[in-house]
Image (tube, grey):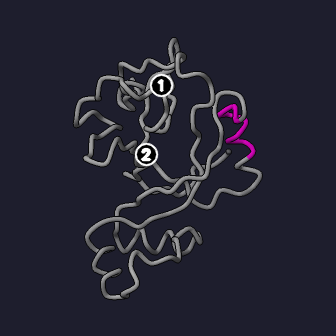
């Protein structure tokens, strides 16, 4: 996109998994409730990029901030949106820090709905966990047979 945008790290997309695309260096992210994922061997806990949690799999990644409509078109082109991936509205969890909260507020990404009806309980919940954000993610659109479902995709391996 011609620049390095501001980004937040360790962002979690729950109930999704990330697998290598067969014959490629890049991954495909799929929803956990996908029929192709059902019945597969669970991935090992602690794998880089994918972590087991009692509620399901979590894909960790980055959240790009302040992407213009033109830059989003560039990203769609790069990701082959509509061919390999579908840009999908998702809810992600961003680790709660004052800096992350300020960045999200300045980017107008922080969800306005409280986690509970009590402002005190909401503040307590946020201080101990995550900020919920609605954003877009590129979700694998091709058949799952194109993914190596027996493996998780690792960013560190990709960088080598």
Q: In the picture, residue 43 is in which quadrant?
A: top left
Q: Which region is colored magenta? A: 73-81
Q: Of residues 101 and 110, which is closer to you in this image?
A: 110
Residue 1 placement (x, y as % from top left) = 67, 45
Query: Residue 120 vs residue 64: left or right?
Result: left
Give the farthest residue toward the left. 45
Q: Of residues 68 and 52, which is closer to you in this image?
A: 52
Image point 65% across, 34% down: which residue?
A: 79
Q: Is residue 124 above or below residue 67?
A: below
Secondary structure under tag 2 reads: strand
Q: Of residues 93 and 8, which is closer to you in this image?
A: 93
Q: Is residue 121 above or below residue 106?
A: below
Task: Give the numbered dot on residue 10.
Answer: none
Q: Main SS type for the magenta part? A: helix
Residue 140 belongs to magenta span: no
Residue 39 placement (x, y as % from top left) = 36, 25
Image point 51% across, 71% down: which residue?
A: 110
Query: Residue 118 vs residue 24: left or right?
Result: left
Task: Mark 2 vs mark 1: give the one in front.
Answer: 1
Residue 114 placement (x, y as % from top left) = 44, 78
Per the model, the C-alpha gap separating discs 2 and 1 is: 23 Å
Check disc 1: other Cα within 10 Å, few if <14, some if 14-19, many if 20+. Answer: some
Q: Is residue 42 above or below residue 138?
A: above
Task: Give the numbered dot on residue 61.
Answer: 2
Q: In the picture, residue 160 is in which quadrant?
A: top left
Q: Earlier in the sequence, mark 2 or mark 1?
A: 1
Residue 112 placement (x, y as % from top left) = 53, 77
Image point 67% across, 45% down: which residue?
A: 2
Image point 25% across, 70% down: which residue?
A: 128
Task: Give the numbered dot on residue 36.
Answer: 1
């Amino acid at each position: 996109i011609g620049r390095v945008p501001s980004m937040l790290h360790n962002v979690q997309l729950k109930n999704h998994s990330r697998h290598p695309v067969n014959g490629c260096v890049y991954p495909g992210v799929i929803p956990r409730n996908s029929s192709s994922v059902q019945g597969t061997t669970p991935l090992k806990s602690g794998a880089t990029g994918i972590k087991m949690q009692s509620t399901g799999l979590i894909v960790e990644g980055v959240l790009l901030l302040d992407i213009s409509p033109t830059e989003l078109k560039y990203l769609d082109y790069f990701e082959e949106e509509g061919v390999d991936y579908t840009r999908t509205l998702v809810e992600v969890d961003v680790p709660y820090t004052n800096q992350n909260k300020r960045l999200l507020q300045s980017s107008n990404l922080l969800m306005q709905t409280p986690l509970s009806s009590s402002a005190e309980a909401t503040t307590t919940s946020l201080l101990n966990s995550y900020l919920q954000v609605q954003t877009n993610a590129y979700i694998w659109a091709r058949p799952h047979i194109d993914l190596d479902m027996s493996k998780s995709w690792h960013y560190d391996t990709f960088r080598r």
